[in-house]
Amino acid sequence: MSMLDLDKFRATPLQHDPFDFLCVPGFVKKEHLEALHRDYPKVDKPGSIPLGVFPQGPAFDAMIEELKGKEVCKAFSEKFGLDLSKYPTMFTARGMCRATDGKIHPDSASKIVTVLIYMNPPWEASGGRLRVLRSPDLEDYAAEVPPDEGTLMCFRRSDTSWHGHYPFEGQRRAIQMNWVKNSVYIWHEQWRHRVGAWAKNTLGIEQKSY
């Protein structure tokens, strides 16, 4: 049984102001949320962490496998007008947010499409709400996305795909999936994030925030 509501994804129009993006609350089906909360990686450090660094359970593994599948790739390819099947995918997970996270950026040029799936209880904090920006100014925004459980936010990366959020400190779970230009970038990022997680855990060195 699919954990993802691709029909809802397909029915949600792609927004073009200020760049190609869409937000789909309820992308992860409600009946799977309890198991996914239970099996989410036990990330107790800030930063983007490659999958497998922290323990994760079978329901989470099943969702990642579905995200890697042909049907998801086809749906996103059709939505963005791209053939994403020829590009590799990269996954990371976040569990904790620092006050220094959320700085405005457009994403690395090696990324093609960024997908965020949030896994948090209904979000009441004013910080930590991702804003889709028209410029590098948090008040110049086209949309604001609370990181509520099951919500998907995705966008096509460009030099002006600005996004960020006001500071928040505490638990903020987000799965990030990217279609990227080549596997070398995946290797580099996985290595960087693994070293960053090790340095933070062993030496107390903060991983750079992106």
Image (cartoon, helix red, strand yellow):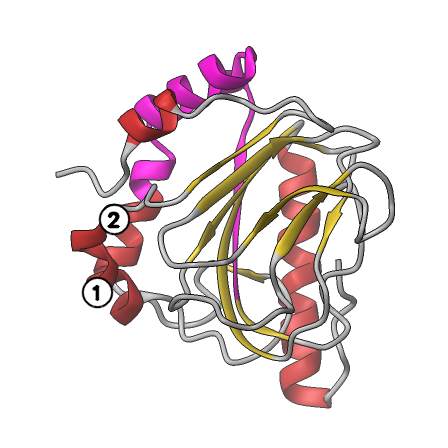
Instruction: Determine whether, in the image, residue 209 is placed left or right of residue 52.
Output: right
17 or 65: nearer the viewer? 17
- Give the percent coordinates (x, y) of residue 60: 30, 57
Q: Which residue is mark 1?
A: 34
Q: Residue at x 41, y 48 (%)?
A: 151
Tell me the tag on residue 62: 2
Is residue 81 rendered magenta in the image?
yes
Question: If the image is split into quadrants, where does the C terminus sit?
Answer: bottom right
Q: Residues within 10 Å of mark 1 (few under 14, many from 20)?
A: few
Q: Are marks 1 and 2 in contact (CB under 8 Å)?
A: no
Q: Residues within 10 Å of mark 2 (few under 14, many from 20)?
A: some
Relative to 44, is 20 above or below?
above
Disc 1 versus disc 2: nearer the observer = 1
Specify whether residue 124 is in view: yes
How much space separates mark 1 and mark 2, taking CA atoms?
14 Å
Tell me the tag on residue 181: none
- Give the percent coordinates (x, y) of residue 116: 52, 47
Residue pushed farthest left?
1
Q: Residue at x 73, y 88 (%)?
A: 203
- Dot 2 falls on a residue whose secondary structure is helix
Q: Quadrant of residue 27?
A: top left
Q: Quadrant of residue 194?
A: bottom right
Q: Residue at x 74, y 28 (%)?
A: 18
192 or 47: nearer the viewer? 47
- Give the percent coordinates (x, y) of residue 33: 25, 59
Is residue 171 rendered magenta in the image?
no
The magenta segment is 65-94
Q: Quadrant of residue 205?
A: bottom right
Type of amino acid at the residue the image marks with label 2: Ala
- Give the percent coordinates (x, y) of residue 62: 25, 48
- Dot 1 falls on a residue whose secondary structure is helix
